[in-house]
Each structure stands twice: as C-alpha cells, then as structure tokens.
Image (spheres, rainbow, N blue to C red):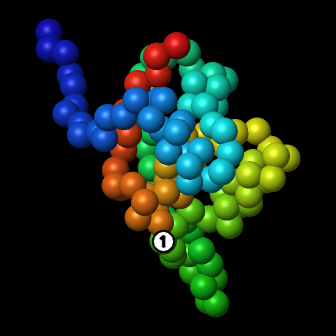
Amino acid sequence: MLLESARNSYNCVDASDVDRFIEFQYGRPYSVARAVDSLDHDTLHIAELVLTHPAHVSDGEVVPRPGVGPEALAEIKAWQNGTAPEPTPELLLSDLASRALIPAGDYLIDICL
C-alpha cells in the first residue's frame, strides 16, 4: 500500500507577523488565530489566495477580472469601519497580493496559541 501525497509550495509565515502586517496595511488590529477560530483549531492554516473575481461583460459573458471582487472589498471596508467581524486571512492576503504588497501564491500560516 502506498500513501498518496502531493508536493506543494507555500509562502510560510508566522501568524503574529501576518497580524502586524495586516494591522499596518489596514489600520485595524487583526488576529489570524481569532479569524480562523470558527474554521478550525489547527496550528497551521493554509490560505489559498484568489487574485481574480468573476465579472460580467456587456453580452452576459463572465470573465475573470484582476483583484478581489466588490463584495469582498465591501467586507473589508465594513471591518475597517468596525461594523463587521474580522475577514478571513485568505480574503485580506488576496487583497494585499492583488495590490502587489505581498507575493502571490498560497500561504502556510503557523498559528502558535
């Protein structure tokens, strides 16, 4: 019997570094550990970034557009205004990568509780 596996490449980061960087970029305190608490209780979190969003063109065709979508931007704005809970790390890191503030790719976040 063989154990199937896949080899992946991640940007490895510490949650506290992500917290500080997000706070610096968005001007709001942030905690990866708190934001993912409802998702899982692992000590490692994989953030798969999405750098495009679907957009409709005049003939009804859906095409990918760069950046996070308008709904995602509204979620970030609501959090910045204090009217919404912390967004997921995937959303914020996707926004930062789409603005070329961090490297694109998937992130392995080490959450030391």
Q: Nearer the viewer, residue 57 or 60?
A: 57
Tell which residue pokes out farthest to the bottom in this image: 58
Q: Nearer the viewer, residue 24 or 84?
A: 24
Numbered disc 1: secondary structure: strand
Residue 88 appears in which quarter of the rendering?
top right
The residue to which callout 1 is attached is 66
64 up-or-down from 81: above or below: below
Q: Residue at horizontal 66%, vertical 39%? A: 29
Q: Residue at horizontal 56%, vertical 62%? A: 68
Q: Residue at horizontal 74%, vertical 52%? A: 80
Instruction: Residue 96 in the image: state x and y as whole percent.
Output: 49, 57
Q: Quadrant of the N terminus?
A: top left
Q: Is residue 90 visible?
A: no
Q: Residue at horizontal 40%, vertical 29%? A: 14
Instruction: Residue 56 in the image: state x and y as whole percent.
Output: 62, 78
Apparent side of residue 44 relative to residue 25 in the rendered image (left or right): left
Tell which residue pokes out farthest to the right in this image: 83
Q: Amino acid at mark 1?
A: Pro
Q: Is residue 79 visible?
A: yes
